[in-house]
Amino acid sequence: MNIQLDTAPCGYFSISSEGIIQSVNGTLLSMLDYERGELLGRHIESAMSVTNKLFFHTYFYPYIQLHGHVNEMYVSFRTSTGQDVPVLLNGVRQQRDSETFIDCVVLAMRKRIEHEKDVLQSKARLEELYQKTNEANRKLELLHAEYETKQQELLRINHQLEAMAWTDTLTGLGNRRYFQEKLLAALASYRENNVPFSLFIIDIDHFKNINDTYGHPVGDQVLTNLARLLQSMTRENDIVARYGGEEFVAILPDTDQETGLSIADRYCATAASTMLGEYQITISIGVATATYGDTDQSLLNQADLALYASKSSGRNQATHAASLVRS
C-alpha cells in the first residue's frame, strides 16, 4: 500500500467476497486502535458489535451484490477496547486478477442521527426476542412490523438528506457539487458520442452594490428570482445550477459554439429586460464549448476567462472563449 493511501484522511479497507480483510490503511487502524496484523485475515464483522453485524450482513452484502456499490451507509465499528466508532461507509465491488474484492472507505461521524438510534435499539430488542418462547415470537412479529416502518422512514429521511446534499437551499437549483457531477457526465458523453455541448458561467453585474445598497435579503431575493428566470429559459435537457455567490452555471447539451453564444446573448437580453421583483439587473456570461482533450477544469477555466472578458468589455454581454483564442 502506497504512503498516500496509507495516510489518507479517511479509513480504507479491502475485503474478499466472503468478508475477509485483505488490506487496511493506517488511518483506519488508528481510528480503531488496532495493529495491522491484528486485522488482516480476519472477517470484517469481527470489528463490529452484534447489532452492527446483523445490520451489515442484512443490508450491506445484499445491496452491493445487487448494485455493485454502496454509498453513505451508516454503521459503527468497534475499537480494540470495545468503543463504538460511528462511520459513513462507501463500498464498491471490483474484479482484480479474476478475484472479487470489495473496496471500502469510511469517514468517522461525530454525531448520531436520533432516528438511527431508534432503529438500532429496535434491532437490539429483536435479538433478545429471538431467544424467547412462543409468546415472545408473537411480540417479535409486532416489533418486526414496527422496525419495517421505521426502516422505511429512515430510507425516506436518507433520500431527503441526499436531495439536500445536491440542492442549493436558497434558489432550489442544483448546487456546485451537483453541477460538477453533471459536468463530468457531459464530458464522458461527449467523448463517447462526439456531440458537442456548451458551458455557461453567469454572473450578476454589480451584485455587491445591490447588497450594499438594499441589504442581503434583497440580494437573496434577486438571486432567487434570477434562478427562476434562468430555469424558464432552459430546454428540457439543459442543466442550470448555482455555482456560488452571485454566479450561476449552465450546461447545454448538443450545443455548438455558434448556438451557445446565441443562446447566451438571449439570456443577457432577457435578464436586462425583465424586472426581478422590484429590481432590474444585467448579467455577464462566459461561454466555452467542449473540444477534444478538454477536462472539467480546462472547460471551466475557458468559460471563466470569457466571463472576465465580458466584464472587462462593459458587462451585460456574452463572450465565447474561442474568440479570446482568435484574438
Image (cartoon, rainbow, N blue to C red):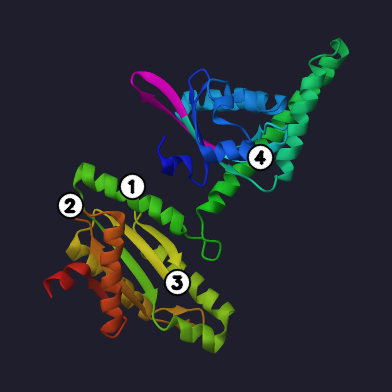
Amino acid marked by disc 1: Ala
Label 4, label 2: how many angstroms apart (C-alpha)?
A: 44 Å
Marked residue nearer the N-terminal end (2 or 3): 3
Residue tagged 3: 226
Marked residue nearer the N-terminal end (1 or 2): 1
Amino acid marked by disc 2: Tyr
Picture quarter with the N terminus:
top left
Mark 1 or 3: in front is 1
Q: Start and end of the magenta stretch?
A: 89-102
Rendered image quadrant of residue 136: top right
Q: Which mark is residue 292?
A: 2
Q: Does residue 317 show up?
A: no
Amino acid marked by disc 4: Pro
Q: Residue at x 47, y 39 (%)?
A: 6
Q: Does residue 189 show up?
A: yes
Do the residues under discs 4 and 3 have CB atoms within 8 angstroms? Answer: no
Picture quarter with the C terminus:
bottom left
